[in-house]
Structure formats: structure tokens, C-alpha cells
Amino acid sequence: MPKKKIRMKVNLPSKHPAKKMKQISQRDRKTRESLIGLADRVVQAAKQRKDPHIDVPSRTLSNVRYSPRKRIIEMGNNTNRRQLFNLSQAKAYMQTMLVASGCKKLVDDGKTTSIRGLFYMLKHTIEGTKEETFSTQDECDPIIEDTEVLLGNLREELHLYAQKRGDMVGPIVLNDSGDQIDCARMGSGGYGIPSIVEPEVVKFVRCDAKFVLHVEKAAVWQRFNEDKFWKKHKCLLTHGNGQPPRGVRRLLHRLHHELELPIYCLLDNDPWGYYIYSVIKQGSINLAYESQRMAIPEARYLGLRSIDLERCGLSESVKITLNENDRKRAKQIVRYPWFEKKRSWQREIKKMLENDFKLEVEALISKDISYVTEEYVPARLRNRDWLD
């Protein structure tokens, strides 16, 4: 029986193209090559009749180390292998390739979506089964992070963004996706810091600021904005609504490294404020693979201190007693290698534990509604009274 000829359909460029092809940036081209390379390795394994597999760097505490030279948290070299023909690993393998495929489509189309949007893009019932590709968002999110670290690409480079959470105001002009934005003319709401702040999206046009003051909470940021602290002190004022999201951290990193602006952090005097400072300064243990592009080792802690109840003459009523969770967290933080050899931090955390209470920045309102903007922070800056 003669062999059947296989006809391959080739889409040749039209003489009269309906629309111009999208221009792809250098960054997108590099990301696309990483995604195609991942697929090519699977095809190559299949051609060689080998079990297709991927080695995903392990995102565990045991595979994280602190680099004293770089002063950031880094990932180690341990990996977890996922094999297609291993029953316990097949689903995670399939999900990883599915996420990579979805990201390639976004890059090719020149579009972005939220991590929630990608979840719905990829969620479906596998044909001939009752098995779902992803049951919940919680199942999808770790696979997205695995794909980031596997490819060595930021989530934003994969055209994914998280929920916007953070604002900025001050003397800087930006070009955001083609629109020029003067952050000194944004009113009471400020400029909403997007999740994707890479140079291809957010460009710095002009900046007259001398430093950045990053505050923990939106309510405190609002007080500084209303009092025009940024105008009086010629600075940029940012917040991350608690633990700053990746977009805020990445923007702070760019402001520091590209514009050489010092970063000061006004945070609560509690283990969670200390941890936020730790993440901004050294990077996150969970996202150690991104420290190089997010951590700011030169950031300084300008937040409330354990001596401030007496030093500022605050009312006893502003004290918040530490709970067991707080004490446990403080004892963990005091052993972090980047705090362990710093006497000032050892004294600070020890004093807080001895006090057995914590203080929020809002406690300064008990002195005066604008005490934090008109006296506390200006004095800390003037006296260079911060922790490093």
C-alpha cells in the first residue's frame, strides 16, 4: 500500500496583509525564546524516546541562603524533578507546561492578564475525563511561581500582573504605557503603582526628588500626602498597603538603582513591621529568586522604635500587648543572618520583647494629628536616626 503523502499547511505572508504585525520588544523576545526552549526540550526528549522531565529549582527554606557579599537572600542549587510518566508528578508537569503555553500566547499577542485571568484561561476539563486542569486559584499560583523560577523570568516578563496595591506622589514625571504622568499633580489619590513597572512600561522622564519615604499603610500615606510632606521635603512618598506587592518593591528598586534615591521605610514597631523592612532590604525567603531585581540592601528603617513611648512622651493607652504569635515571630527575626550580627537590631528586638508591647505609627497621632509629618520624621532624618 503506497504511503500517504502528508501535506503541511504553511501560512505565507499575504501580499496585502490585513494588519501590521505587532512589534516585539527585546525583553519579550528573550522571554519568548525561554518559553520556546522549554517546549523544545520536551520535543527533543520525545524524539529520543526519553521520559520528558523538567527540573524546577526548589523554593524551600533549606534551599535559600543569605549572601553577606551581596547582602541579599539567594536561592541555592537544589531542584525538584517533574516527570511526565511519573503518576504522582504527571499533573504538576502538565500544569507547568500549560502555564508556559498560556504565557507564550500572551507574549505573542502583546497582551497582559492577571494571575486570576490566566487561571481562567487555562481552566478546563481534560477531554475524555472528569479531571480539571486546575481546580482552584490556590492550585495555579504555585505553578506560576514555579514557571517563573524555572525560566528565570519575572512574572511581569511573562505578561502577568497581580492586584494593584500601592500609591506614589511627589516630584517625578513618568511615561506609563505612552501616557505622561506628573506625580506632583495627582491630587489626594496619588499615582496608583501598577503591578508591571518594567522600563518598557514605566519610564522615568524627570525626577526632582532627593529621597523616597516608603510608609507601611495607606492611612499614614494619606496623612503625609494631605500635609504635603513630599513638597516640603522634596521627596517621593509611597506605600504598599502593608506588605508591599511586587510592583511596589520593583519600583522602589528601580528608583534606588536607576535614580540613586535613598529609600527610608516608616513602619510599625512590631515583628511584622520588622519583617516588611527585611523583605524590602534583603528580599523575600519565598521569592528569593527575585531578590537581585527587588532587594535594596541600602534601605534604612525609619520606623517607630521600642524607646519611642518614652522618647516621644506617648500615652500609655497606645501600647498594644504582644501576643504569642508576635513573640514567636520576633524570636525568628532576631535570628535572621542579616540581623544576627547587627547590635542595633539585636538591642531593638530585645527591647521590644522586654517591653512586651508594640507600637503602630498611628500612635503618634495621640500627640498631634500631624506630629508624624511635622516633627517625628523630620527629626529622624535630620539626626540620621535610623536603623540599617
Image: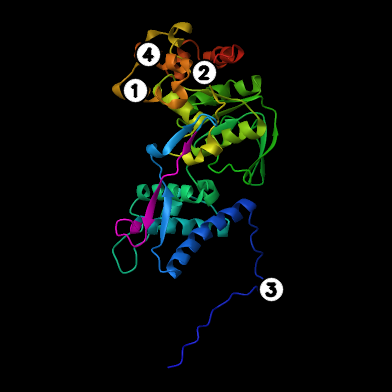
User: Label 2 belongs to which residue?
Assistant: 387
Q: Is residue 190 visible?
A: no
Is residue 156 on the magenta stretch? no
User: Label 3 belongs to which residue?
Assistant: 16
Q: Residues within 10 Å of mark 2 (few under 14, many from 20)?
A: some
User: Label 1 belongs to which residue?
Assistant: 326
Q: CA distance from mark 3 to mark 2?
A: 65 Å
Q: Up-down: is 13 above or below 37?
A: below
Mark whose residue sits in front, 3 or 2: 2
Q: Tell me if 326 is positioned left or right of 289 in this view.
A: left
Q: CA distance from mark 4 to mark 3?
A: 73 Å
Between residue 33 and residue 9, name the one nearer to us: 33
Mark whose residue sits in front, 1 or 4: 1
Considering every residue shown, the one lying at the far bottom of the view is 1
Between residue 317 and residue 346, name the one nearer to us: 346
Amino acid type of the residue tagged 1 in the rendering:
Asp
The x and y percentages for residue 78 are: 41, 45
User: Label 4 belongs to which residue?
Assistant: 319
Amino acid type of the residue tagged 4 in the rendering:
Lys
